[in-house]
Image (tube, rainbow, N blue to C red):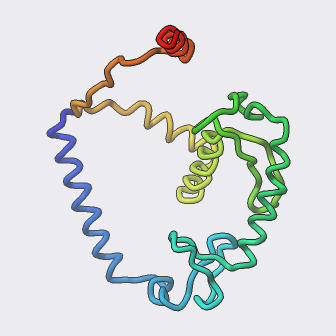
Amino acid sequence: MNLSTHLNTQQLEQENITGLDCQLQQKPNQEEIGQKSIKKCCRCGRYDLATNITDDNYCHYYHPLCARIKVRNQIKLSKMKDGITHCQITGIEAGRYQAALYVDHDHNTLLGRAVVCAALNTLEGSAKFIMHETGCDTTGIKVFLDALYARPGIDLGLEPYPEQGYTTYEEAEAALNEATN
């Protein structure tokens, strides 16, 4: 697929999305109708009168009791991380960003499952959303990933990053030691 075909496809998709947006705007859901008086707690997921909900000024609304329970639960969950140096599922060593460790738990049973890397924790949450929205199971997630990886690439003229700096930390450290000695 060339860039022109891709852009035409994007334009058609945008027109379809715009048409859908217009339809959605004509039929507001109940949450939108009562938006000023009813809010949804981001912790328990239940709706309540706005007078019973706290706004953290960062797009989150919650019951004050739910916020306190969240803090208590985080303290309990954090104890599972004691002495853990690697993701208990993938074996990836604890680090920053995607390698940061989180305690995974089942939101329905409230049971801790494992200490996992951020990448796996995000994958699990995303997979759960896709399964809920599409009705598929974990096999369906693999089908979706295989379909994504099988799609032909589209040449958009993206530029590669230049090879600057050092390939490994050790090389950079040696260069730093040399420069400071």
Name the residue at 48% across, 86% down: 35
Considering depth in this image, is 170 or 5 the residue closer to the camera? 170
Q: Is residue 132 left or right of residue 71?
A: left
- In this view, the residue farthest toward the left is 4
Total count of labels: 0
Q: Is residue 58 above or below residue 26?
A: above
Q: Is residue 77 above or below residue 16?
A: above
Q: Is residue 7 left or right of residue 142?
A: left
| Residue 121 in which image quadrant | top right
| Residue 75 in which image quadrant | bottom right
Name the residue at 45% across, 83% down: 32
Q: Is residue 66 left or right of residue 127?
A: right
Considering depth in this image, is 163 or 146 the residue closer to the camera? 163
Q: Position of residue 97 (x, y in %)?
A: 57, 39
Q: Position of residue 148 (x, y in %)?
A: 43, 37
- In this view, the residue farthest toward the front is 181
Considering depth in this image, is 53 or 4 the residue closer to the camera? 53
Q: Is residue 158 above or below residue 6?
A: above
Q: Position of residue 164 (x, y in %)?
A: 36, 18
Q: Position of residue 1 (x, y in %)?
A: 22, 33
Name the residue at 51% across, 69% down: 58
Name the residue at 72% across, 28% down: 91
| Residue 96 in which image quadrant | top right
Q: Is residue 98 left or right of residue 17?
A: right
